[in-house]
Image (cartoon, rainbow, N blue to C red):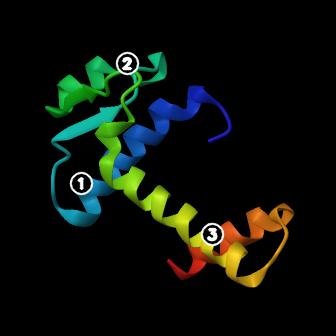
Amino acid sequence: MHNKSEVRANVTNFITYAENQFSTKVKIIRTENGIEFSMHDLFASKGIIHQTTCIETPEQNGIIERKHQHLLNVTRALLFHSSILAIFWCFSVQHAAFFY
């Protein structure tokens, strides 16, 4: 997406894609508290429960937080063991993510 205004079209396309490709219905969508996700009419027409995350609580994304922490740990290990300068951090993260 290039703009937040594309959110509605992308969410609608995703819901249609999931229903057609996987023969299932989307039951719950969890988003942040952004106003671009206020599509109550769309969610109500599809019978979808819209949940929003609590502000300032990254703990709700526990799996993502653990994966992110793992990537950072692997990146630090790669830099430390190879004695590469910290300016190559981005390449080390890409390498860790590729093999993860």
Q: Position of residue 11 (x, y in %)?
A: 40, 39
- At horizontal 38% and vertical 57% (from top left) the residue drawn is 66
* Kind of residue indicated by mark 2: Ser
The answer to whether residue 67 is above or below residue 82 is: above
Which of the labelled discs sits on residue 19, or is there none?
1
Mark nearest the camera among 1 and 2 is 2
Mark nearest the camera among 1 and 3 is 3
First of labels 1, 2 by sequence position: 1
First of labels 1, 3 by sequence position: 1
Give the labeled residue for mark 2: 38
Q: Secondary structure at mark 3?
A: helix
* Kind of residue indicated by mark 3: Thr
Q: Position of residue 46 (x, y in %)?
A: 19, 33
Q: Secondary structure at mark 2?
A: loop
Q: Is residue 41 left or right of residue 97?
A: left
- At horizontal 34% and vertical 44% (from top left) the residue drawn is 61
Mark nearest the camera among 2 and 3 is 3
- At horizontal 81% and vertical 63% (from top left) the residue drawn is 86
Which of the labelled discs sits on residue 100, or is there none?
none
Q: Quadrant of the N terminus?
A: top right
First of labels 2, 3 by sequence position: 2
Q: Is residue 52 left or right of residue 84?
A: left
Q: Secondary structure at mark 1?
A: helix
- At horizontal 56% and vertical 61% (from top left) the residue drawn is 72
The answer to whether residue 77 is above or below residue 67 is: below
